[in-house]
Image: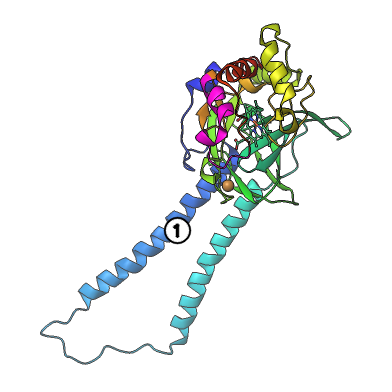
Amino acid sequence: MSVALATTSNSLSVFEAASPPAASIRDLFFLILFITAVIFLLTEGLIVYCIWRFRRKPETSPAEPPQIYGSNPIEVAWTIGPALVVFVLFLVMVRTVAAVRVREQPADALHVTVIGHQWWWEYEYYETSPSGEKRLLFRTANELHVPQNRAVALELKSADVIHSFWVPRLAGKVDVVPGHTNHLWFQVWEPGVYHGQCAEYCGDQHANMMLRVVVDPPGEFDAWLKNEQQPARDAPDVRVGRQLFASLACVECHTIRGTRAEGRFGPDLTHLMGRQTLIATTTPNNRDTLHRWVRNPHDLKPGAKMPSFQLSEGQLREMAAYLESLR
Ligand code: HEC
Ligand SMILES: [Cu+2]
């Protein structure tokens, strides 16, 4: 985690590519910018040159210059020239599309299913057996952990409306469509935190539907993966909060593995404190935020699909302490 924090940058710039698909897109952009810039300078240069070279001078006669209308060679030249340019642009684009599209994934690719919800992201981690069968390991939310330098294959699904998964430094944006699975891949060169955002208007809190990709060095990733697979730890000193949680509707919407909470509507809370942020990465994850969130989610995120429970301050403190024990 320390490494990840050290290299945090909030950049959403497509020019700071950190993975092959993003680099392909950036290179295509620069190539097309270069080709069109050359064409621009050539045509504008010719216009400026002609205006200057053929300007009306006192010694020139007012007669019109020779007319070229209907000249076959010239018509053919300026039809074929631009057609060739468009053809070259087409070829380089096809090459980029092939590079960013999901190819055959390497056998050791990490498989994660991303599910867009109004207004947060759910991730399901899978293990692929040698026979190609996928087995669900666990679910988490908003902060997607991946190992450095290993191919990551994402399946994108939606639980409600159309969203769009976009981490500009890693890959192009791909729509997340109900009833249809889209795919995306990347392989990140450097550890760090990469910011992303929903890129398709999806309702009230679309602007706050952010996400983070945390790229861990392989050792740290394995430790994280191992911890996430454990059920929630039993901490005796938060018994009151745990009972409160179990007795309220929290269990209908949230899962805490190892308890009777098995809801799927909201984020999995089993290892809640493994996340540095809450509420689609918009707010630091600490006891104070947890307290304020449970008191009234709509203070922090108007429209959020979680109700307020009118708990007393004492109950809120017990609840926050329990949530904070979920490491
Ligand atoms: C009607 C379903 C529902 C109920 C009931 C519910 N929640 Fe939630 N909860 C959600 C949803 C949806 C979110 C995600 C909100 C968002 O980010 O837009 C959420 C988010 C959270 C988060 C933040 C998780 C994260 O990683 O950002 C916590 C903590 C939480 N709920 C705790 C509770 C507690 C404690 C209770 C019971 C007092 C509870 N919830 C009851 C639906 C529910
Ligand atoms: Cu959105």
Q: Quadrant of the C terminus?
A: top right
Corner quadrant of residue 89:
bottom right
Residue drawn at (53%, 16%), measured in percent from left and top? 2
* The furthest residue to the top: 237
Examine the residues drawn in magenta and state their main secondary structure.
Answer: helix
Question: The residue under label 1 is which amino acid type?
Answer: Ile
Placement of 316 over or under 175, stated as above or below: above
Magenta-tinted stretch? 288-305
Q: Quadrant of ligand 1?
A: top right
Find out whether residue 109 is within the magenta segment: no
- Asked if residue 237 lies left or right of residue 27, the reply is right
Give the percent coordinates (x, y) of residue 309: 63, 30
Visible residue check, residue 290 = yes
Corner quadrant of residue 144:
top right
Residue drawn at (49%, 43%), measured in percent from left and top? 14
Visible residue check, residue 191 = no
Residue drawn at (56%, 27%), measured in percent from left and top? 295
Q: Quadrant of the N terminus?
A: top right
Of residues 71 and 135, which is closer to you in this image? Answer: 135
Q: Which residue is mark 1?
A: 35
Of residues 297 and 225, which is closer to you in this image? Answer: 297
Find out whether residue 300 is within the magenta segment: yes
Q: Residues within 10 Å of mark 1 (few under 14, many from 20)?
A: few
Of residues 258 and 164, which is closer to you in this image? Answer: 258
Of residues 216 and 327, which is closer to you in this image? Answer: 327
- State the scheme by which the image is colored: rainbow
Give the percent coordinates (x, y) of residue 26: 51, 46
* The furthest residue to the bottom: 63
Label 1: element kind = helix
Give the percent coordinates (x, y) of residue 229: 75, 21
